[in-house]
Image (spheres, rainbow, N blue to C red):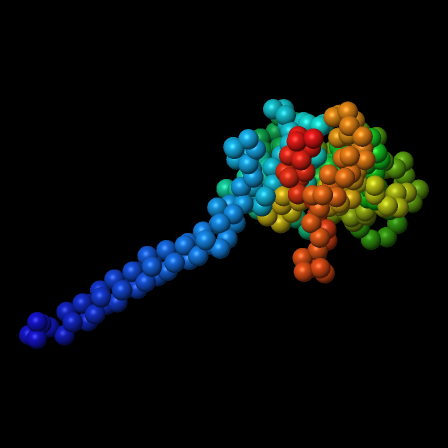
Amino acid sequence: MKHMPIWMHRYLAALRTLLVLTLLTGVLYPLVVTGIAQVAFNDGANGSLVKKDGRAVGSALVGQNFTDAAGRPVGRYFQSRPSVAGDGYDMLSTAASNLGPEDIVDVLPVPGARGGEGRRSLLTQVCARSRAVGELEGVSGARPYCTPDGVGAVLKVFPAVGTPTRAVSVNQACPASPFVAEYRGVRVECGRPGESYAAGRTVPVRGTTVRAVVPADAVTASGSGLDPDISVAYAELQAARVARERGVPVERVRQLIAENTTGRTLGFMGEPAVNVLALNLALDRG
């Protein structure tokens, strides 16, 4: 070995380093960390699985939909917040929509056109969800900046500067009736799919609704798309419907909400939350 070329010594040293580090960081370290996790944090290390009758029905850390085969909410269960992860709570597609508060103008679908499926703005998604929740719970789904038919109340005004000569309700496709009849003396038109309104001035219209009944977490998705919790306000909104569907006193349902509510982290971080899966399982147990 002493007559081995210098470059060979370097390769052997590098190989030994690779083997040692692989053993330390690729074998020993994962085994030690896994062992500690299994002993000290067994539940969390195994996915915080929730079981019913000995069978895993979900995780306390990952939300899920409580809908039927057609995607309709099952009335006897509390509903989770919206999710844009795949078809909903897909752990392989965890993501947010990346849409911001300025995303308020839809791309209207063009029937029969290739690639003409359109795109709903964040505002319209919120409006549509609020209307759907309102109908499910028997309350008003109205929100500021939303039309009665559940889209963003947004006008495009022409010209962009100066006295208006034309106004279009861009999120309401013809032949829909615009949510307002006129804007500054100009008759408001419905939106025509395929027509570009980019040159107009965007005017969101607040409307007469001062405060929404449907809570914010009922109409917005979480950043991960996997949030297992809802706000206490959203749970309370659903209590009457769940009690009616199950034929139990609403006071009992509210008691279960309280029992499945977790407080603020460390007593001051965040807001109290209700784990939807745990609450629904508690309902099934009676």
| Residue 202 higher or lower than 7, as above or below | above
| Residue 107 higher or lower than 272, as above or below | above
**Could you tell me which quadrant the N terminus lies in?**
bottom left
- Between 258 and 163, the residue placed more toward the observer is 258
* Left or right placement of residue 235 versus residue 188 in this view: left
| Residue 267 higher or lower than 81, as above or below | below
Question: In the rendering, at what x and y percent does residue 274 appear?
Answer: 70, 44
**Could you tell me which quadrant the C terminus lies in?**
top right
Question: In the rendering, at what x and y percent does residue 268 appear?
Answer: 72, 60
Question: In the rendering, at what x and y percent does residue 213 appear?
Answer: 83, 41
Task: Specify the farthest residue to the right.
Answer: 185
| Residue 179 higher or lower than 261, as above or below | above
Residue 202 appearing in the image = yes
Residue drawn at x 93%, y 42% as measured from the top left: 185
Question: In the rendering, at what x and y percent does residue 150 appear?
Answer: 78, 35
Residue drawn at x 66%, y 30% as measured from the top left: 284
Residue 255 is drawn in which quadrant?
Answer: top right
* Left or right placement of residue 129 versus residue 29 in this view: right
Figure label count: 0
* Left or right placement of residue 279 versus residue 143 in this view: left
Residue drawn at x 61%, y 29% as measured from the top left: 113
Residue drawn at x 69%, y 49% as measured from the top left: 262
Residue 137 is drawn in which quadrant?
Answer: top right
Task: Specify the farthest residue to the left.
Answer: 3
Residue 168 appearing in the image = no
